Amino acid sequence: MNLQCTNVLEHFMYIHECLQIEIKENESYLLHYSFDKQFDKSQWTYYLDFLPVSFQKEVLRYRRWQDRYNCLLGKLMVYAGFYLFNAHKIEFKNFLKDSYGKPFIKNSNLNFNISHSGNTVVCIFSHQDIGIDIEEIQHIEYTLFENVFSDQEMQKIEQYGVSKFYEYWTKKEAIIKAIGKGMSIPLLDIKLEDNYSIYNGNRWYTKSEKMGNVYCSIASQYQQNNVNLIELIF
């Protein structure tokens, strides 16, 4: 499924009536948005004021406008997703972070994970533990990452080039984010196989693909995780 929504904050009733979605146990929904310019002043103010003051301060701590947009849009995506998949608005007081800094919604059985890079923001929703990572594709010096990849993984990267680097990097990051313990997990401890990855004796399945100018990977413990795409418009 690949859906496109109108303005996600001004038309929640439209979304509720036309696109209300029940997520099945073996599937996830990936909301994505890419921007190429800044909002006009009134639009920026509208979206920023939609958030509580504490979240506004978090957004405005960033100096680069692109980083501010990534932070703001990630939070708006969570809001939009909960309306799509739970049929009600979340209260921002329940939008919290755990001791590792992973965001979650209190008293909800819906899991989500946010990632952004360059001018693209994504947020994935599922009933299972889920992780997502995207990275803007740029020239990279592989040898600087020998402490991240095994010898076998480095050989594959050297053989196939930049696309394999970003595939492997985003897979490992997505698994870390699904586990939810941040960078306390060494990337080298995650062993990548052809169809799955292993960390601490547990098997993780990943899906990876290029989306425009970013590489994206999703990690879950379901071998058959059906990923549905929804493009949001702000």
Image (tube, helix red, strand yellow):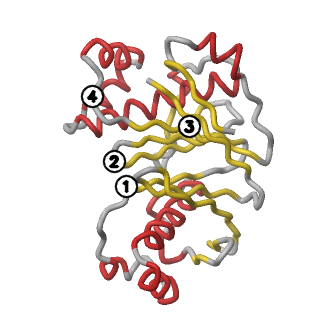
Dot 1 amino acid type: Glu
User: In x, y percent, where is residue 214?
Assistant: 42, 54
> In which quadrant will I find the C terminus?
top left
Image point (62%, 58%), residue name: 219
Find numbered disc 4 in the image and state the secondary structure of the residue it sits on.
loop
* Type of the residue with mark 2: Gly
Which circle marks residue 136 in the picture? 1
Per the model, the C-alpha gap separating discs 4 and 2 is 13 Å
Does the CB distance between marks 1 and 2 fall below 8 Å?
yes
Count up the numbered dots.
Answer: 4
Q: Nearer the viewer, residue 16 or 36?
A: 36
Residue 213 in the image: state x and y as whole percent: 40, 53
Q: Residues within 10 Å of mark 4 (few under 14, many from 20)?
A: few
Give the residue drawn at x 29%, y 67%: 139
- Amino acid on which disc 4 is placed: Gln
Check the image and report above or below for 20 versus 36.
above
Marks 3 and 4, how far apart at CA? 20 Å
Q: Secondary structure at mark 1?
A: strand
Q: Which residue is mark 4?
A: 38
Residue at (41, 43) in percent of width and height? 120
Q: How many C-alpha atoms fall within 10 Å of the one at disc 3: few (<14), some, or many (≥20)? A: many
Distance between mark 3 and mark 2 Cα atoms: 16 Å
**First reached walking from the N terminus: tag 4 or tag 2:** 4
Q: Real-space Cα distance between discs 1 and 2?
A: 6 Å
For marks 4 and 1 on the same chain, the one whose residue lies earlier in the sequence: 4
Q: Which mark is residue 31?
A: 3
Read off the residue under disc 2: 118
